[in-house]
Amino acid sequence: MQKLFALIYKDFLMLIRDRAGIALLFLMPLVLVFIMTSIQDNTFKSINETRISLIILDNDNDSLGLTIERELEKSNLFKVSKQIDNIKPTEAILKEAVASGKFQIGIIIPADVTKKLKKNSKRNISRAFSGLPADTTGRIDTSQISVYIDPITKNSFKTTIFSTLREFTSKIENDLIISEITKEINQRLPFNKVSLSSKSSITFKEEYALKENSSIIPNSVQHNVPAWTMFAMFFIVISLAGNMIKEREEGSVNRLLTMPCSYSTFITSKILVYIVVCLLQLLLMLLMGVYFFPTLGLPSLKIGVNFFAIFTIALSSSLAAIGYGVLIGTISTTHQQAATFGSISVMILAAIGGVWVPVFAMPPFMRTISVVSPLNWGLNGFYEVFIREGGTINVLFDSFKLVLFFGFCLLVASFYKRLVKK
Protein backbone atom coordinates (compact mmCIF):
# COMPACT_ATOMS: atom_id res chain seq x y z
CA MET A 1 0.00 0.00 0.00
CA GLN A 2 2.90 2.34 0.81
CA LYS A 3 4.32 1.73 -2.66
CA LEU A 4 0.96 2.55 -4.21
CA PHE A 5 0.76 5.86 -2.33
CA ALA A 6 4.29 6.69 -3.44
CA LEU A 7 3.38 5.98 -7.06
CA ILE A 8 0.21 8.07 -6.77
CA TYR A 9 2.25 10.98 -5.41
CA LYS A 10 4.73 10.57 -8.27
CA ASP A 11 1.95 10.55 -10.91
CA PHE A 12 0.32 13.56 -9.28
CA LEU A 13 3.60 15.51 -9.47
CA MET A 14 4.05 14.57 -13.13
CA LEU A 15 0.54 15.76 -13.86
CA ILE A 16 0.71 19.16 -12.16
CA ARG A 17 4.17 19.96 -13.55
CA ASP A 18 2.79 19.74 -17.06
CA ARG A 19 0.97 23.08 -17.15
CA ALA A 20 0.08 22.79 -20.82
CA GLY A 21 -1.38 19.37 -20.13
CA ILE A 22 -3.44 20.73 -17.23
CA ALA A 23 -4.82 23.45 -19.49
CA LEU A 24 -5.66 20.83 -22.12
CA LEU A 25 -7.46 18.65 -19.57
CA PHE A 26 -9.51 21.33 -17.83
CA LEU A 27 -9.67 24.60 -19.75
CA MET A 28 -10.17 23.20 -23.25
CA PRO A 29 -13.35 21.23 -22.35
CA LEU A 30 -14.81 24.28 -20.59
CA VAL A 31 -14.12 26.49 -23.60
CA LEU A 32 -15.52 23.85 -25.97
CA VAL A 33 -18.74 23.36 -24.05
CA PHE A 34 -19.24 27.13 -23.76
CA ILE A 35 -18.66 27.76 -27.49
CA MET A 36 -20.73 24.82 -28.72
CA THR A 37 -23.58 25.52 -26.32
CA SER A 38 -23.72 29.18 -27.34
CA ILE A 39 -23.69 28.26 -31.03
CA GLN A 40 -26.27 25.50 -30.76
CA ASP A 41 -28.60 27.23 -28.32
CA ASN A 42 -30.86 28.54 -31.09
CA THR A 43 -31.37 25.03 -32.49
CA PHE A 44 -33.13 24.09 -29.24
CA LYS A 45 -35.28 27.19 -29.15
CA SER A 46 -38.56 27.66 -30.91
CA ILE A 47 -38.17 28.99 -34.41
CA ASN A 48 -40.43 31.79 -33.26
CA GLU A 49 -37.45 33.18 -31.38
CA THR A 50 -35.11 32.97 -34.36
CA ARG A 51 -36.96 35.35 -36.74
CA ILE A 52 -35.80 34.72 -40.30
CA SER A 53 -35.07 37.94 -42.20
CA LEU A 54 -37.35 38.24 -45.24
CA ILE A 55 -37.93 40.89 -47.90
CA ILE A 56 -41.22 40.88 -49.84
CA LEU A 57 -42.10 42.68 -53.08
CA ASP A 58 -45.88 42.71 -53.52
CA ASN A 59 -46.82 43.64 -57.10
CA ASP A 60 -50.30 42.19 -56.62
CA ASN A 61 -51.62 44.65 -54.01
CA ASP A 62 -54.73 42.53 -53.67
CA SER A 63 -56.08 39.76 -51.47
CA LEU A 64 -53.38 37.15 -52.09
CA GLY A 65 -50.40 39.48 -51.76
CA LEU A 66 -51.80 41.28 -48.72
CA THR A 67 -52.80 38.02 -47.04
CA ILE A 68 -49.39 36.43 -47.60
CA GLU A 69 -47.74 39.49 -46.12
CA ARG A 70 -50.11 39.52 -43.14
CA GLU A 71 -49.73 35.77 -42.48
CA LEU A 72 -45.94 35.98 -42.65
CA GLU A 73 -45.92 38.75 -40.06
CA LYS A 74 -48.48 37.01 -37.82
CA SER A 75 -46.53 33.73 -37.84
CA ASN A 76 -43.58 35.28 -35.97
CA LEU A 77 -41.35 33.02 -38.05
CA PHE A 78 -40.08 35.89 -40.16
CA LYS A 79 -38.86 39.42 -39.74
CA VAL A 80 -40.66 40.90 -42.75
CA SER A 81 -39.39 43.96 -44.60
CA LYS A 82 -40.96 45.68 -47.61
CA GLN A 83 -38.26 48.27 -48.25
CA ILE A 84 -34.50 48.42 -48.62
CA ASP A 85 -32.99 51.68 -47.40
CA ASN A 86 -36.53 53.12 -47.16
CA ILE A 87 -37.17 52.47 -50.87
CA LYS A 88 -39.42 49.82 -52.41
CA PRO A 89 -36.99 47.51 -54.25
CA THR A 90 -37.13 46.31 -57.81
CA GLU A 91 -36.81 42.60 -58.53
CA ALA A 92 -33.11 43.03 -59.40
CA ILE A 93 -32.36 44.95 -56.19
CA LEU A 94 -34.26 42.40 -54.11
CA LYS A 95 -32.35 39.53 -55.69
CA GLU A 96 -29.03 41.29 -55.08
CA ALA A 97 -29.93 41.96 -51.43
CA VAL A 98 -30.62 38.26 -50.83
CA ALA A 99 -27.51 37.19 -52.74
CA SER A 100 -25.35 39.48 -50.60
CA GLY A 101 -26.77 38.05 -47.36
CA LYS A 102 -28.79 41.08 -46.22
CA PHE A 103 -31.90 38.88 -46.21
CA GLN A 104 -32.26 35.13 -46.02
CA ILE A 105 -35.38 35.08 -48.19
CA GLY A 106 -36.82 37.30 -50.90
CA ILE A 107 -40.40 36.88 -52.17
CA ILE A 108 -41.83 38.48 -55.30
CA ILE A 109 -45.61 38.29 -55.75
CA PRO A 110 -46.57 38.96 -59.39
CA ALA A 111 -49.22 41.45 -60.44
CA ASP A 112 -52.85 40.37 -60.89
CA VAL A 113 -52.27 37.01 -59.18
CA THR A 114 -55.41 37.45 -57.06
CA LYS A 115 -57.54 38.28 -60.12
CA LYS A 116 -56.29 35.16 -61.91
CA LEU A 117 -56.96 33.00 -58.87
CA LYS A 118 -60.48 34.35 -58.45
CA LYS A 119 -61.15 33.93 -62.15
CA ASN A 120 -60.02 30.30 -62.14
CA SER A 121 -61.97 29.50 -58.97
CA LYS A 122 -65.18 31.11 -60.24
CA ARG A 123 -65.02 29.34 -63.61
CA ASN A 124 -64.33 25.90 -62.09
CA ILE A 125 -67.04 26.25 -59.42
CA SER A 126 -69.62 27.49 -61.94
CA ARG A 127 -68.90 24.51 -64.18
CA ALA A 128 -69.18 22.14 -61.23
CA PHE A 129 -72.57 23.53 -60.13
CA SER A 130 -73.78 23.42 -63.72
CA GLY A 131 -72.91 19.74 -64.02
CA LEU A 132 -70.18 20.39 -66.60
CA PRO A 133 -66.92 18.40 -66.61
CA ALA A 134 -63.68 19.93 -65.39
CA ASP A 135 -62.01 22.46 -67.69
CA THR A 136 -59.31 20.62 -69.66
CA THR A 137 -58.85 23.21 -72.39
CA GLY A 138 -55.79 24.73 -70.75
CA ARG A 139 -57.49 28.08 -70.21
CA ILE A 140 -56.54 28.21 -66.51
CA ASP A 141 -54.31 31.15 -65.77
CA THR A 142 -51.26 30.26 -63.70
CA SER A 143 -49.10 32.53 -61.61
CA GLN A 144 -45.66 32.00 -60.21
CA ILE A 145 -44.44 33.47 -56.94
CA SER A 146 -40.67 33.87 -57.04
CA VAL A 147 -38.76 32.94 -53.90
CA TYR A 148 -35.06 33.77 -53.67
CA ILE A 149 -32.96 31.99 -51.04
CA ASP A 150 -29.62 33.08 -49.60
CA PRO A 151 -27.01 30.73 -51.19
CA ILE A 152 -25.53 29.76 -47.81
CA THR A 153 -28.89 28.47 -46.55
CA LYS A 154 -28.87 24.75 -45.81
CA ASN A 155 -31.28 22.45 -47.65
CA SER A 156 -33.10 21.48 -44.45
CA PHE A 157 -33.73 25.16 -43.67
CA LYS A 158 -34.88 25.78 -47.24
CA THR A 159 -37.36 22.90 -46.96
CA THR A 160 -38.81 24.45 -43.82
CA ILE A 161 -39.22 27.82 -45.56
CA PHE A 162 -41.01 26.40 -48.60
CA SER A 163 -43.23 24.20 -46.43
CA THR A 164 -44.33 27.27 -44.49
CA LEU A 165 -44.97 29.33 -47.63
CA ARG A 166 -46.94 26.52 -49.27
CA GLU A 167 -49.07 26.26 -46.15
CA PHE A 168 -49.88 29.98 -46.30
CA THR A 169 -50.68 30.04 -50.02
CA SER A 170 -52.81 26.87 -49.80
CA LYS A 171 -54.79 28.41 -46.97
CA ILE A 172 -55.36 31.59 -48.97
CA GLU A 173 -56.36 29.67 -52.09
CA ASN A 174 -58.79 27.52 -50.08
CA ASP A 175 -60.34 30.66 -48.57
CA LEU A 176 -60.95 32.09 -52.05
CA ILE A 177 -62.44 28.82 -53.30
CA ILE A 178 -64.79 28.55 -50.32
CA SER A 179 -65.75 32.19 -50.76
CA GLU A 180 -66.72 31.51 -54.38
CA ILE A 181 -68.63 28.35 -53.38
CA THR A 182 -70.54 30.36 -50.77
CA LYS A 183 -71.48 33.02 -53.35
CA GLU A 184 -72.64 30.36 -55.83
CA ILE A 185 -74.77 28.58 -53.24
CA ASN A 186 -76.37 31.82 -52.04
CA GLN A 187 -77.21 32.83 -55.61
CA ARG A 188 -78.97 29.51 -56.18
CA LEU A 189 -80.62 29.51 -52.72
CA PRO A 190 -81.51 33.19 -52.16
CA PHE A 191 -83.92 32.48 -49.28
CA ASN A 192 -81.51 30.34 -47.25
CA LYS A 193 -78.20 32.13 -46.86
CA VAL A 194 -75.21 29.85 -46.29
CA SER A 195 -71.94 30.81 -44.64
CA LEU A 196 -69.00 28.45 -45.06
CA SER A 197 -65.66 28.75 -43.31
CA SER A 198 -62.24 27.30 -44.08
CA LYS A 199 -61.09 27.64 -40.49
CA SER A 200 -59.68 24.34 -39.32
CA SER A 201 -61.28 22.67 -36.30
CA ILE A 202 -58.06 20.78 -35.58
CA THR A 203 -55.19 22.38 -33.67
CA PHE A 204 -51.77 21.08 -32.67
CA LYS A 205 -50.20 20.95 -29.25
CA GLU A 206 -46.43 20.67 -29.10
CA GLU A 207 -44.63 19.43 -25.98
CA TYR A 208 -41.81 17.14 -24.97
CA ALA A 209 -42.69 13.62 -23.83
CA LEU A 210 -41.51 14.00 -20.25
CA LYS A 211 -41.99 11.68 -17.32
CA GLU A 212 -44.60 12.58 -14.72
CA ASN A 213 -43.52 15.44 -12.45
CA SER A 214 -40.37 15.95 -14.55
CA SER A 215 -38.79 19.39 -14.20
CA ILE A 216 -36.13 18.95 -16.89
CA ILE A 217 -36.77 20.59 -20.27
CA PRO A 218 -34.38 19.54 -23.10
CA ASN A 219 -32.15 22.39 -24.23
CA SER A 220 -28.67 23.02 -25.61
CA VAL A 221 -27.06 22.83 -22.16
CA GLN A 222 -28.65 19.50 -21.25
CA HIS A 223 -27.25 18.06 -24.48
CA ASN A 224 -23.86 19.73 -24.68
CA VAL A 225 -22.59 19.31 -21.12
CA PRO A 226 -22.71 15.47 -21.14
CA ALA A 227 -21.45 15.33 -24.74
CA TRP A 228 -18.38 17.46 -24.12
CA THR A 229 -17.78 15.88 -20.72
CA MET A 230 -17.37 12.54 -22.48
CA PHE A 231 -15.08 14.14 -25.04
CA ALA A 232 -12.96 15.73 -22.28
CA MET A 233 -12.68 12.47 -20.37
CA PHE A 234 -11.41 10.57 -23.39
CA PHE A 235 -9.04 13.36 -24.33
CA ILE A 236 -6.94 12.49 -21.28
CA VAL A 237 -5.46 9.84 -23.56
CA ILE A 238 -2.89 12.43 -24.68
CA SER A 239 -1.77 13.28 -21.15
CA LEU A 240 -1.87 9.72 -19.79
CA ALA A 241 -0.16 8.12 -22.77
CA GLY A 242 2.40 10.93 -22.86
CA ASN A 243 3.32 10.38 -19.21
CA MET A 244 3.72 6.64 -19.77
CA ILE A 245 6.01 7.20 -22.75
CA LYS A 246 8.02 9.81 -20.87
CA GLU A 247 8.63 7.39 -18.01
CA ARG A 248 9.74 4.69 -20.43
CA GLU A 249 12.11 7.06 -22.24
CA GLU A 250 13.63 8.26 -18.96
CA GLY A 251 13.99 4.71 -17.67
CA SER A 252 11.96 5.42 -14.53
CA VAL A 253 9.57 2.53 -15.28
CA ASN A 254 12.37 -0.03 -15.05
CA ARG A 255 13.69 1.58 -11.86
CA LEU A 256 10.23 1.53 -10.30
CA LEU A 257 9.72 -2.12 -11.17
CA THR A 258 12.95 -2.98 -9.32
CA MET A 259 11.66 -1.50 -6.02
CA PRO A 260 10.24 -4.25 -6.27
CA CYS A 261 6.96 -2.90 -7.60
CA SER A 262 4.54 -4.88 -9.73
CA TYR A 263 3.33 -3.54 -13.07
CA SER A 264 -0.26 -3.79 -11.82
CA THR A 265 0.54 -1.42 -8.94
CA PHE A 266 2.24 0.94 -11.39
CA ILE A 267 -0.91 1.04 -13.56
CA THR A 268 -3.27 1.22 -10.57
CA SER A 269 -1.68 4.47 -9.39
CA LYS A 270 -2.27 6.05 -12.78
CA ILE A 271 -5.86 4.82 -12.83
CA LEU A 272 -6.58 6.36 -9.43
CA VAL A 273 -4.95 9.70 -10.28
CA TYR A 274 -6.77 10.04 -13.60
CA ILE A 275 -10.12 9.00 -12.10
CA VAL A 276 -9.81 12.09 -9.91
CA VAL A 277 -8.96 14.15 -13.02
CA CYS A 278 -12.01 12.88 -14.91
CA LEU A 279 -14.35 13.47 -11.98
CA LEU A 280 -12.97 16.99 -11.56
CA GLN A 281 -13.64 17.60 -15.26
CA LEU A 282 -17.25 16.53 -14.74
CA LEU A 283 -17.58 18.69 -11.62
CA LEU A 284 -16.30 21.78 -13.44
CA MET A 285 -18.68 21.11 -16.35
CA LEU A 286 -21.63 20.77 -13.98
CA LEU A 287 -20.75 23.94 -12.09
CA MET A 288 -20.38 25.82 -15.37
CA GLY A 289 -23.77 24.58 -16.60
CA VAL A 290 -25.60 25.26 -13.35
CA TYR A 291 -24.13 28.62 -12.32
CA PHE A 292 -22.19 30.26 -15.17
CA PHE A 293 -24.39 29.70 -18.23
CA PRO A 294 -27.49 31.42 -16.75
CA THR A 295 -25.48 34.62 -16.21
CA LEU A 296 -24.95 34.72 -20.01
CA GLY A 297 -28.60 34.24 -20.86
CA LEU A 298 -28.18 30.53 -21.65
CA PRO A 299 -30.40 27.85 -20.10
CA SER A 300 -29.35 26.43 -16.75
CA LEU A 301 -28.26 22.82 -16.48
CA LYS A 302 -30.75 20.69 -14.56
CA ILE A 303 -28.96 17.72 -13.02
CA GLY A 304 -31.95 16.24 -11.23
CA VAL A 305 -31.66 14.40 -7.93
CA ASN A 306 -30.15 11.06 -9.01
CA PHE A 307 -26.61 11.86 -7.89
CA PHE A 308 -25.58 8.22 -7.49
CA ALA A 309 -26.63 7.55 -11.09
CA ILE A 310 -24.46 10.48 -12.20
CA PHE A 311 -21.54 9.13 -10.18
CA THR A 312 -22.03 5.61 -11.60
CA ILE A 313 -21.97 6.66 -15.25
CA ALA A 314 -19.19 9.19 -14.58
CA LEU A 315 -16.97 6.61 -12.86
CA SER A 316 -17.50 3.98 -15.55
CA SER A 317 -16.86 6.56 -18.28
CA SER A 318 -13.67 7.61 -16.50
CA LEU A 319 -12.48 4.01 -16.33
CA ALA A 320 -13.18 3.50 -20.03
CA ALA A 321 -11.24 6.65 -20.94
CA ILE A 322 -8.33 5.69 -18.67
CA GLY A 323 -8.23 2.16 -20.05
CA TYR A 324 -8.04 3.55 -23.56
CA GLY A 325 -5.26 5.93 -22.49
CA VAL A 326 -3.27 3.07 -20.95
CA LEU A 327 -3.68 1.07 -24.16
CA ILE A 328 -2.48 3.95 -26.34
CA GLY A 329 0.41 4.63 -23.96
CA THR A 330 1.44 0.97 -24.06
CA ILE A 331 1.42 0.44 -27.82
CA SER A 332 2.82 3.88 -28.79
CA THR A 333 6.58 4.25 -28.92
CA THR A 334 6.84 8.05 -29.27
CA HIS A 335 4.98 11.12 -28.07
CA GLN A 336 4.07 11.95 -31.66
CA GLN A 337 2.42 8.56 -32.14
CA ALA A 338 0.45 8.85 -28.92
CA ALA A 339 -0.65 12.44 -29.54
CA THR A 340 -1.56 11.90 -33.19
CA PHE A 341 -3.26 8.52 -32.96
CA GLY A 342 -4.82 9.30 -29.59
CA SER A 343 -6.38 12.62 -30.60
CA ILE A 344 -7.56 11.44 -34.03
CA SER A 345 -9.05 8.22 -32.67
CA VAL A 346 -10.91 10.13 -29.95
CA MET A 347 -12.23 12.54 -32.60
CA ILE A 348 -13.50 9.58 -34.64
CA LEU A 349 -15.08 7.89 -31.63
CA ALA A 350 -16.71 11.20 -30.67
CA ALA A 351 -18.02 11.73 -34.21
CA ILE A 352 -19.60 8.30 -34.54
CA GLY A 353 -20.70 8.36 -30.90
CA GLY A 354 -23.02 11.35 -31.29
CA VAL A 355 -20.92 14.11 -29.71
CA TRP A 356 -20.72 16.23 -32.87
CA VAL A 357 -24.01 15.24 -34.53
CA PRO A 358 -26.92 13.43 -32.82
CA VAL A 359 -27.04 9.74 -33.73
CA PHE A 360 -30.64 10.00 -34.97
CA ALA A 361 -29.52 12.53 -37.60
CA MET A 362 -26.84 10.22 -39.02
CA PRO A 363 -27.22 8.00 -42.11
CA PRO A 364 -28.38 4.41 -41.37
CA PHE A 365 -24.87 2.97 -41.74
CA MET A 366 -23.40 5.48 -39.28
CA ARG A 367 -26.22 4.82 -36.81
CA THR A 368 -25.32 1.15 -36.96
CA ILE A 369 -21.64 1.63 -36.19
CA SER A 370 -22.27 4.28 -33.52
CA VAL A 371 -23.00 1.50 -31.03
CA VAL A 372 -19.30 0.50 -31.02
CA SER A 373 -18.17 3.87 -29.66
CA PRO A 374 -17.64 3.98 -25.87
CA LEU A 375 -18.41 7.71 -26.04
CA ASN A 376 -21.87 6.77 -27.28
CA TRP A 377 -22.41 4.50 -24.28
CA GLY A 378 -21.35 7.18 -21.83
CA LEU A 379 -23.38 9.83 -23.63
CA ASN A 380 -26.51 7.67 -23.51
CA GLY A 381 -25.96 7.13 -19.81
CA PHE A 382 -25.66 10.86 -19.12
CA TYR A 383 -28.74 11.54 -21.25
CA GLU A 384 -30.70 9.04 -19.16
CA VAL A 385 -29.92 11.13 -16.07
CA PHE A 386 -29.82 14.70 -17.42
CA ILE A 387 -32.74 14.54 -19.85
CA ARG A 388 -34.89 11.51 -19.02
CA GLU A 389 -34.34 11.75 -15.25
CA GLY A 390 -33.46 8.08 -15.07
CA GLY A 391 -32.05 6.40 -11.97
CA THR A 392 -29.06 4.17 -11.35
CA ILE A 393 -30.78 1.14 -12.85
CA ASN A 394 -31.22 3.02 -16.13
CA VAL A 395 -27.47 3.58 -16.55
CA LEU A 396 -26.29 0.14 -15.43
CA PHE A 397 -26.17 -1.40 -18.91
CA ASP A 398 -24.14 1.45 -20.42
CA SER A 399 -21.92 1.51 -17.32
CA PHE A 400 -21.32 -2.23 -17.65
CA LYS A 401 -20.24 -1.82 -21.28
CA LEU A 402 -17.85 0.98 -20.31
CA VAL A 403 -16.27 -1.07 -17.52
CA LEU A 404 -16.02 -4.03 -19.91
CA PHE A 405 -14.23 -1.76 -22.40
CA PHE A 406 -11.87 -0.68 -19.60
CA GLY A 407 -11.03 -4.30 -18.81
CA PHE A 408 -10.58 -5.13 -22.48
CA CYS A 409 -8.12 -2.25 -22.98
CA LEU A 410 -6.06 -3.28 -19.94
CA LEU A 411 -6.05 -6.90 -21.13
CA VAL A 412 -4.83 -5.96 -24.61
CA ALA A 413 -2.22 -3.59 -23.14
CA SER A 414 -0.94 -6.32 -20.80
CA PHE A 415 -0.83 -8.88 -23.62
CA TYR A 416 1.00 -6.44 -25.90
CA LYS A 417 3.55 -5.63 -23.18
CA ARG A 418 4.31 -9.32 -22.64
CA LEU A 419 4.52 -9.90 -26.37
CA VAL A 420 7.01 -7.06 -26.85
CA LYS A 421 9.15 -8.36 -23.97
CA LYS A 422 9.44 -11.73 -25.68
Image: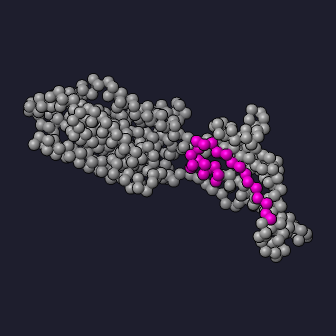
Q: In this image, 253 relative to 392: left or right?
A: left
Q: In this image, 329 relative to 27: left or right?
A: left
Residue 224, by quadrant, is top left
278 drawn magenta: no
Decide which of 376, 133 is in the foreground and name it: 133
Inspect this view and state whether residue 53 appears. Answer: no
Q: Residue 147, position in %: x, y?
A: 68, 48
Range of magenta residues: 139-163
Q: In this view, does 219 lie above or below 118?
A: above
Q: Residue 171, position in %: x, y?
A: 72, 57
Q: Which residue is depicted at the point 68% across and 38% down? A: 96
Q: Work out which quarter of the rendered image holds the C terminus and state it.
A: top left
Q: What is the residue that sits farthest to the bottom in this orientation?
A: 131
Q: Residue 400, position in %: x, y?
A: 29, 50
Inspect this view and state whether residue 331 appears. Answer: yes
Q: Which residue is depicted at the point 66% across and 43% down? A: 105
Q: Which residue is depicted at the point 75% across and 60% down? A: 174
Decide which of 360, 312 is in the foreground and name it: 360
Name the colouring of the figure: one colour
Q: Which residue is depicted at the point 89% across and 68% down? A: 187
